[in-house]
Amino acid sequence: MLPIPEEDSEGEPINTEVKDEEDKKEEEPEKEAEAKSTLFAEKVWVCKTTSGRSQVVLAQFKRSDGDTEKGLYEFRTIGKNQYGLLGQGADIKESKTFKPVDFGDMKINSIEEVVVGNLHVMMRLNGLNKVFTWGCYNTDNEERMVFKPTEVTFFTGKY
């Protein structure tokens, strides 16, 4: 496994602290404290683009409390959104902190396989029997850029 880089391609330090909306709410005073699920990084992939000048770190996190209502797993990325590799949408140019990949309302409770290429990410979710991709890839000899996880229907029912 490759180490997580400490600085981006421009020499700026990368903040590896994970914060999401729930973390922000927790920082504010609350009337009643609720037990909060903690995310633990299980796997990390480093995507280096073919130019070698840009890289994205994809991390798979698992919820400590096994809460399948929110989704047992969460994927977060950090880096530059070159070729859509962050999976956070087209309006995000760069992420200096780990932020969730935008799966919309989909809950991820079972992962079969994650494949990280130079320009794209593919993920097979075994509970849903579906394959998703984001980044840059070719389809029918046409280059496509996908900025959020999108189902690849070609694979439906073929595995």
Image: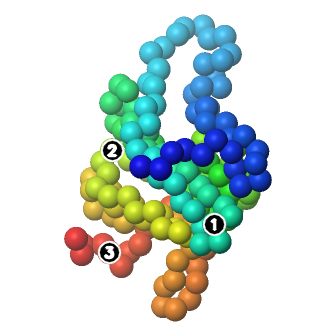
Q: Give how far apart the Cα atoms at labels 2 and 3 are.
A: 20 Å
Residue farthest toward the top in the current orientation of the protein: 31
- Horizontal and vertical percent for residue 81? 67, 60
Disc number lying in front (1 or 3): 1
Residue of label 2:
109
Q: Check if mark 2's residue and mark 3's residue have beta carbons within 8 Å.
A: no
Q: Is residue 158 above or below residue 122?
A: below
Give the residue at x 58% y 84%: 143
Residue of label 1:
52
Name the N-terminal-most of marks 2 and 3. 2
Q: Is residue 101 above or below residue 115?
A: above
Q: Callout 2, which amino acid?
A: Asn
Q: Callout 3, which amino acid?
A: Phe
Q: Callout 1, which amino acid?
A: Gly
Q: Secondary structure beneath disc 2?
A: loop
Give the residue at x 36% y 31%: 67
| Label 2: few (<14), some (14–19) or many (≥20) C-alpha neighbours in 10 Å | some
Residue of label 3:
155
| Label 1: few (<14), some (14–19) or many (≥20) C-alpha neighbours in 10 Å | few
